[in-house]
Amino acid sequence: MPERRPFDVLNSSLNNTVIIGMKGGAEFRGVMVAYDVHMNIVLEKAEQLVNGEVKRGVGTVLLRGDSVTFISPA
């Protein structure tokens, strides 16, 4: 199995639904449409999650890379 680097994982997540964990415990689920070298992430059709349940829809959102704690497939 070839070695996978962090940007390989991010690239394979493009146009797929992911869950993003943020510092402070906030979580967002949405379709990852873009990222950059600072790991800033753009989600479309994003929803804010609380205890795994949808709290509210937020549409398109930019999540600052230095606040991201994890990225998981949804």
Image (cartoon, rainbow, N blue to C red):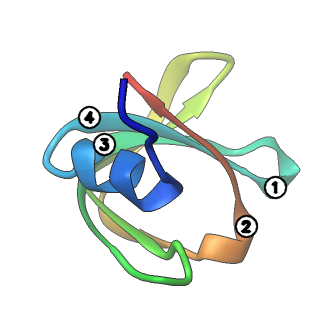
Few, some or many residues within 10 Å of mark 2 (<14, 14–19, 20+)? some
**Would you name the residue on which mark 3 appears?**
30
**Would you name the residue on which mark 1 appears?**
23
> Who is closer to the viewer here, 2 or 74?
2
The first of marks 1 and 2 along the sequence is: 1
The first of marks 1 and 3 along the sequence is: 1
Q: Residue at x 44, y 43 (%)?
A: 4
Identify the element where label 2 is drawn: helix
Instruction: Answer with left or right where residue 8 lies relative to residue 16.
Output: right
Identify the element where label 3 is drawn: strand
> What amino acid type should be assigned to the residue bearing mark 2?
Ser
Q: Residue at x 52, y 72 (%)?
A: 39
> Who is closer to the viewer here, 57 or 11?
11
Alpha carbon distance from label 3 to label 4: 5 Å
| Quadrant of image for the N terminus | top left
| Quadrant of image for the C terminus | top left
Few, some or many residues within 10 Å of mark 4 (<14, 14–19, 20+)? some
Identify the element where label 1 is drawn: helix
Please report contact status of discs 1 and 2: CB closer than 8 Å, yes or no. Answer: yes
Alpha carbon distance from label 2 to label 3: 17 Å
**Would you name the residue on which mark 4 appears?**
17
The quarter of the displayed image where residue 13 is located: top left
The first of marks 2 and 4 along the sequence is: 4
Few, some or many residues within 10 Å of mark 1 (<14, 14–19, 20+)? few
Numbered circle sitting on residue 67:
2
Identify the element where label 4 is drawn: strand
> Who is closer to the viewer here, 18 or 13?
13
> What amino acid type should be assigned to the residue bearing mark 4?
Thr
Please report contact status of discs 1 and 4: CB closer than 8 Å, yes or no. Answer: no
Alpha carbon distance from label 1 to label 3: 18 Å
